[in-house]
Image (spheres, grey):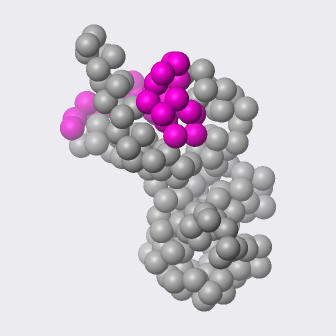
Amino acid sequence: MTGAGQLVVDLHDPTPPYEQVRRQILEAVRIGALPVGSRLPTIRALARDLGLASGTIARAYKELEATGVLVTARGAGTRVAEGAPRQAAEGHGLTEATGAARTAALAPGSVGGDSRTTPAARDVPMPAADAPASPPALAAEVHAAVARWRSVGYEVDAIRAALEDALRQTDGR
């Protein structure tokens, strides 16, 4: 990807510009147009090319980093991460199985009642069997799940309600 050659931001679209950029990069990774290791433009360069604020591009990149699609290293720039095509397909809800799992996991009358606004408990990534059970590790797992849910459009209130509901169910209340 060089400059904004493949990205288009529609300022008349109600979708925020950072989300349009994030989705387009995610789709490019998913279909292989941006293979693993591909270097993306700098935040400033892409913002300039698209006529957007640097903070807009930084937010798109940060959200993609949080979901494991991009990786940024000082001196090496921002690149497509190992495993990113799988992350892109799963994190974007582009696979049939992911959509079906989200729909099936929502019980009638659940908060929001709609797979687009309420994350299903099955969407939470399970820690590895050898993962430390420390509070920082748990916080990191929750942070990653919330970042992924936010990146696919779930609202904060829906995430909070789903997490509270899941905790109530596991407590037997």
Q: Which residue is drawn at 78% across and 53% down?
A: 31
Q: How many marks?
A: 0
Q: Quadrant of residue 12?
A: bottom right
Residue furthest out toward the left: 135
Quarter of the figure with the N terminus: bottom right
Q: Where is residue 116 in the image (x, y as percent from the top left)?
A: 58, 40
- Going by the picture, which residue comes out furthest to the top? 172
Q: Does the magenta stretch include residue 108?
A: yes
Q: Where is residue 23 in the image (x, y as percent from the top left)?
A: 65, 59
Whether residue 87 sits left or right of residue 3 in the image: it is: left
Residue 135 image point, x, y percent: 21, 38
Q: Quadrant of residue 45?
A: bottom right
Q: Where is residue 65 in the image (x, y as percent from the top left)?
A: 49, 59
Identify the residue at image location x=54%, y=74%.
57
Q: Left or right of 169: which side holds 79?
A: right
Q: Does residue 61 appear to the left or right of 165 in the view shown? A: right
- Asked if residue 49 lies in the magenta stretch, the reply is no
Residue 25 visible, this angle: no
Relative to 6, say whether 139 is above or below.
above
Which corner quadrant holds the C terminus?
A: top left
Which of 31/96 is in front?
96
Secondary structure mostly seen in the magenta stretch: loop
Say if 43 sits above or below 97 in the image. below
Residue at 77% from the left image edge and 55% from the top image edge? 32
Is residue 168 in view? yes
* Residue occupying the point 33% across, 16% down: 169
State which region is magenta. Answer: 106-135
